[in-house]
Image: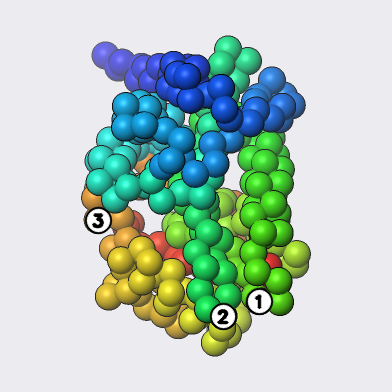
């Protein structure tokens, strides 16, 4: 006899945020979805609210990735994930239940700025509608506009998903602005940006800098995905499956300006 795995119960955004929601911007994303934007969540959310957010992220990310994400969020909580974010966004459906999330950091350095996309996803029933791309494009554009003029800005992320790679490529001014690439080595400025990002992540010792690869990036998990994602693009899928082990990740670095 087989049993059907129950989908996790998705939490209500109003219950997660409580009174903190009153000071947050709300965006209509279309398709029955709304986004609640929390700028500097470490300052806006008290300890109790942050704990509710972490608890809510577990069922939502477990649904998104198809693997138990409890250990992942336990580790991210210890690292101060919410406290360090420049912006955190919760996405709700028509019933007000959380179906997605995204967030980013802004990391200023003397010669350039890194905008780091940190943990993003949607439950499977809401994927592939283009909503996340439009939301991220708007939020990232606003963030880049606030970076120092005349200095390079790089959009960065850590991922082992070619689907996220394809999404991030669409956030950049040109498709070939994102590295790594299947047939082109990363230029020196991109490698240097990756080194700074790895140092900020505390993973400089496990970075293969020329390949933009972090070996054992997700040491708190047995696996990140229940089933490895693919895009149908042979070159792109080969880049990820050919170079990354189960817990490895690429540091994606894209030139914004």
What whole-number distance in Å separates the C-alpha atoms at marks 1 and 3?
34 Å
Q: Position of residue 104 (x, y in %)?
A: 52, 51
Discs 1, 2 touching: Cβ within 8 Å: yes
Can the viewer see residue 133?
no
Q: Alpha-carbon neighbours of circle 2 within 10 Å: few (<14), some, or many (≥20)?
A: few
Which quarter of the image is occupied by the N terminus? top left
| Residue at position x 68%, y 36% in the image | 131
Q: Which mark is residue 166?
A: none
Can the viewer see residue 106?
yes
Q: Is residue 200 above or below residue 211?
A: above
Relative to 135, 223 lies left or right = left
Name the residue nearer the viewer: 202 or 72: 202
Q: Which residue is mark 2?
A: 111
Relative to 140, 226 lies left or right = left
Which comes before the other along the chain, label 1 or label 2?
Answer: 2
Q: Position of residue 25 (x, y in %)?
A: 63, 31
Q: Which mark is residue 151?
A: 1
Which comes before the other along the chain, label 3 or label 2?
Answer: 2
Q: Which mark is residue 219?
A: 3
SS for dot 1: loop
Q: Alpha-carbon neighbours of circle 3 within 10 Å: few (<14), some, or many (≥20)?
A: some
Which quarter of the image is occupied by the C terminus? bottom right
Which image quadrant is residue 91 in? top right
Residue furthest to the bottom: 188
What is the total number of numbered labels drawn onto the structure image?
3
What whole-number distance in Å separates the C-alpha atoms at marks 1 and 2?
6 Å
Q: Is residue 246 above or below residue 189?
A: above
Q: Alpha-carbon neighbours of circle 1 within 10 Å: few (<14), some, or many (≥20)?
A: few
| Residue at position x 24%, y 56% in the image | 219
Q: Position of residue 212 (x, y in %)?
A: 45, 74
């Amino acid at each position: 006899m087989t049993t059907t795995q129950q989908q996790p119960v998705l939490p209500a955004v109003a219950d997660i945020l409580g009174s903190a929601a009153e000071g947050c911007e709300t965006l209509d994303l279309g398709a029955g979805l709304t986004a609640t934007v929390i700028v500097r969540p470490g300052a806006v959310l008290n300890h109790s609210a942050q704990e509710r957010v972490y608890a809510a992220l577990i069922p939502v990310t477990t649904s998104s990735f198809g693997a138990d994400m409890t250990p992942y969020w336990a580790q991210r909580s210890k690292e101060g994930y919410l406290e360090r974010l420049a912006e955190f966004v919760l996405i709700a459906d028509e019933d007000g239940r959380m179906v997605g999330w995204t967030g980013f950091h802004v990391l200023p350095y003397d010669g350039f700025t890194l905008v780091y996309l940190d943990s993003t996803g949607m439950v499977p029933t809401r994927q592939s509608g283009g909503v996340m791309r439009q939301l991220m494009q708007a939020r990232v554009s606003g963030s880049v506009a606030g970076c120092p003029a005349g200095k390079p800005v790089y959009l960065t992320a850590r991922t082992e998903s070619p689907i996220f790679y394809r999404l991030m490529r669409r956030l950049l001014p040109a498709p070939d602005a994102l590295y790594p690439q299947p047939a082109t080595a990363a230029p020196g400025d991109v490698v240097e940006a990756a080194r700074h990002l790895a140092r900020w992540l505390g993973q400089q010792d496990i970075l293969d800098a020329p390949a933009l690869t972090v070996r054992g990036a997700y040491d708190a998990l047995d696996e990140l995905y229940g089933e490895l994602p693919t895009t149908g693009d042979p070159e792109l899928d080969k880049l990820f499956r050919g170079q990354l082990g189960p817990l490895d990740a690429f540091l994606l670095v894209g030139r914004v300006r």
